[in-house]
Amino acid sequence: MAESQIVPPRPYARTSSAALPLFAFAVILAALITLPFWATGYTQRSVLEFLYFLALAQAWNLMAGYAGMMSIGQQAFVGIGAYGLVVMAEDLGINPFLTVPLAAILAVILAVPVSWLLFRLKGAYFAVATWVIAETVRLTVNANIDWLGGGRGRTVRSLGQFDRHLREDLGYWVALALAIIAVFGVFFLLRSKTGLALQAIRDTENGARSVGVETRRTKRIVYLFAAAIAGATGALIYIVQINVRPDAAFSINWAAYVIFIVVIGGIGTIEGPILGTLVFFFLRGMLADLEAWSMLIFGLIAIMMMLFAPKGLWGLLNTHRPVLLFRTARRLPERFAPQKEGE
Amino acid sequence: MIATSTMLNGVLLGGLYALYGLGLSLTFGIMRTVNLAHGDIIVLATYLALITTQVLGLTPLMSLAVLVPVMFCIGYGLQRLILNRTLKDGMMPAVIITFGLSFVIQNGLLLGFSADRQVLRQGAIETMGVTLAPGVTIGVFPILTLAVLLVMIFALQAFMGRTLLGRAFRATSDDPATAELMGIDGKRIYGLAMGLSFAIIAVTGVVMGIRSNFSPFDGPARLIFAFEVIIIGGMGSIYGVLAGGLILGIAQTIGGAINPTFFQLAGHLVTLGILVVRPSGLFPETIERD
């Protein structure tokens, strides 16, 4: 510290707005939007599945990776979205595709009281309680409401009004919109003030609270966002699959696949779940004929990742030179930068 | 008569549920992280008992002589070699690792033993019953389960309350950093706690296998029952496990008596009700820790 320079202080630390490699995004987006016109039906169905898993993974990652809420019960909202589709399309006569955003709203309405209950719990208690709630909803739907078809479930017959190709194409675009909303919703949320609060909570929750972050409110926003994404995804999945059964709609596998995806890709980044979903689909394709082996291998991979690469594949890629596609981290203003020895 | 019989069956079922909860409560109370593979490890123990009875020709109850030490070692190894490596990163790695382990065990058992339901054959005791009054008959083995549970609870309570190692367990539960300063090796305590939990699971698995048939995917439901027992009873309390098991068992049998489809649902609703009115359970003993 020979002489002190006067550095004009920056008002706040923020990443530049030209943070996205826009051109690459535009090309990928254009390819995805036009996909139904040039790809085979099989490819289209695979990409559709990829897109809704990506949406679920982004939402779970925001919740677990940033807000520290380790939920293993998101299947509750997937199932609620699925049954929202059934009731709204079959009983209320609403256009099935319109039920996707409505299912998101329904999931949020139900997630509010659930969050009052869950937010009294911490850590591991929270995790298992989310599962108990999902099981409670499943059993309620499964056995006690005849109107929902009991254990055999119900079929969304009103989808029959659409031509098969039109239905598949519309479903595909809805999935694309959902994935874009999930990825960019998380992106813009993280770049907002709430995102700053979230990243503080991720680093240390008590520290964040001590500097005035409203942790409970911030976490509730995230929880409701994740519920909305899961609800919309649930409605979308059963627009494609048509037959809604409680065991499938409320299956723990919705949570399990998503957890494996995020753990493989890298928890606490936006890029991680994208990479994770790609790797997951690649592995699942290779293990397609070996149902039991594939779940066993995914379980083993999750264990290995946590032990040897807790930041996931994206973390491994970033060890030496940071590659930031989605810039959500904030730079420290220079006046706060750590000073080097001998300066 | 039906009411009495329902209550009695609820109490006896609760004994089994308390057994499920006992091992989980121990590790939950000390490590503050939930072993999501708990239910699957119970089922794994049952399958290990099945192998032991077939290979060595022992009865299931005698197979415990082999199973308890083996399970203790597996638990100790799991904690020391795998879970202890991730302690510094909070509870999330342990939760994800045990979640992954749960899928490994389920599908490993499926590949090894197929999805067929199996039973452990102990002999006549499985089906023996005592008629207390006309219309009120209870099984001998469920009573035996309750007795085993009570012995284990009292033994565990005495171990925690009166021995030096038990005191180290409690100290580590309350404040691991300070316990370390007092010369307690926290990682070893965690290993021993997991080992002890697995030893209890060995007994639980054999009892479960004799009482009912089992298949590779029975674990998750067992985990949920175990967890509900802890929520109702209160974290870290050994007697709370007994109370939680009985309440859960009675709630389920009453729900099932009203309508068979309410059986599990009634248990879940009681648990969620307890979470609303007393989130730390009826008899919490461990102190809050971040």
Image (cartoon, coloured by chain):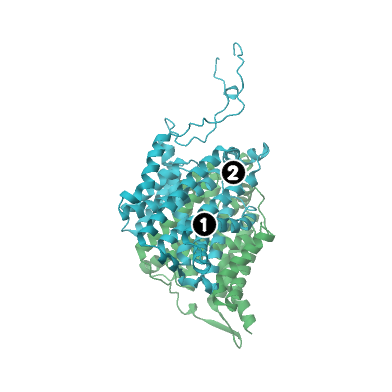
Chain colours: A cyan, B green
- On the question of residue A58 being in view, the answer is yes
Percent of width and height locating residue A141? 53, 68
Q: Nearer the viewer, residue B196 or A202?
A: A202
* Mark 1: secondary structure: helix
Work out how far the residue at label 1 is from the one at label 2, CA to CA, in angstroms. Answer: 48 Å
**Would you name the residue on which mark 1 appears?**
A231
Q: Amino acid at mark 1?
A: Gly
The residue tagged with tag 2: helix, strand or loop?
A: loop
In depth, the one of B30 and B218 nearer the eye is: B218
- Most foreground residue, B45 or A236: A236
Q: Is residue A33 above or below residue B51?
A: above
Q: Chain of mark 2?
A: B
In the picture, measured across the screen, residue B117 lies left or right of residue A109, that is left
The residue lying at 42 percent from left, 58 percent from top is B105
* Residue at the spot of label 2: B184
* Label 1 CA crowd tier, 10 Å (few <14, some 14–19, many 20+): many
The three-letter code of the residue at mark 2 reads Ile
Q: What is the quadrant of residue B49 in the picture?
A: bottom left
x 53%, y 40%: residue: A188
Mark 1 or mark 2: which is in front?
A: 1
- Could you tell me which residue is drawn at 60 percent across and 11 percent down? A3
